[in-house]
């Protein structure tokens, strides 16, 4: 598991350390989680569908519109570690399928 304090650091970390899934907060210092999502799927399209957003602001107008349109999971705060583990298991199965498809 890799962690970063803000969107710019997360993007730089992904450039150095490939990931199979990403959990982003909607509200990040500097680059927003939504902007980070766009940057990630632009550079690493294989991660689309394997990104989740955690948020306590899902009902905010600026967030709600975004969250209704993308291919990502929304995990509402407060959340349990079980919710994260369940999402991650699904995301990693998707990563395994993608890797198997590339080998075939």
Image (spheres, rainbow, N blue to C red):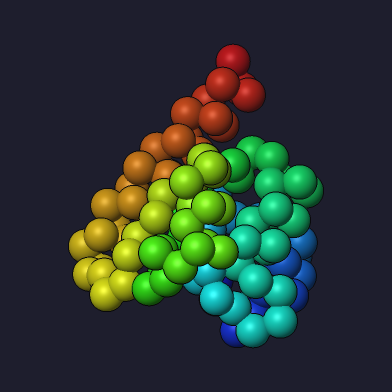
Q: Residue furthest front?
A: 61
Q: Is residue 90 above or below residue 7?
A: above
Using the image, determine if residue 63 lies above or below residue 44.
below
- Work out whether residue 56 or residue 90 is closer to the camera in this orientation and state it: 56
Please indicate whether residue 10 sits to the left or right of residue 12 in the image. Answer: left
How many numbered discs? 0
Q: Is residue 94 visible?
A: yes
Seen at 55% across and 53% down, the residue is: 66
**Position of 15 relative to 46 (above/below):** below
Asked whether residue 1 appears in the rendered view, the answer is no
Question: What residue appears at the point 41 percent right and 49 percent down from the top-left corner?
Answer: 73
Residue 73 is left or right of residue 104, and the answer is: left
- What is the x, y in percent for residue 75? 35, 60
Image location of residue 31, percent across then percent down: 71, 74
Q: 51 or 15, which lies in front?
A: 51
Residue 100 is situated, as x and y percent measured from the top left of the image, at: 53, 25
| Residue at the image point whose x is 45% and y is 35% from the top | 94
x, y percentage for residue 23?
48, 62
Please state which of residues 60 and 85 is positioned toward the viewer in this rendering. Answer: 60
Quarter of the figure with residue 39? bottom right
């Amino acid at each position: 598991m890799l962690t970063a304090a803000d969107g710019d650091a997360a993007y730089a970390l992904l450039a150095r350390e490939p990931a199979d899934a990403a959990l982003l907060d909607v509200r990040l210092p500097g680059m927003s989680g939504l902007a980070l999502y766009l940057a990630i799927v632009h550079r690493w399209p294989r991660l689309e569908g394997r990104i989740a957003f955690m948020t306590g602001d899902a009902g905010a107008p600026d967030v709600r519109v975004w969250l209704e349109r993308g291919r990502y999971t929304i995990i509402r705060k407060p959340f349990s570690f079980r919710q994260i583990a369940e999402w991650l298991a699904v995301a990693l199965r998707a990563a395994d399928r993608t890797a198997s498809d590339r080998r075939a």
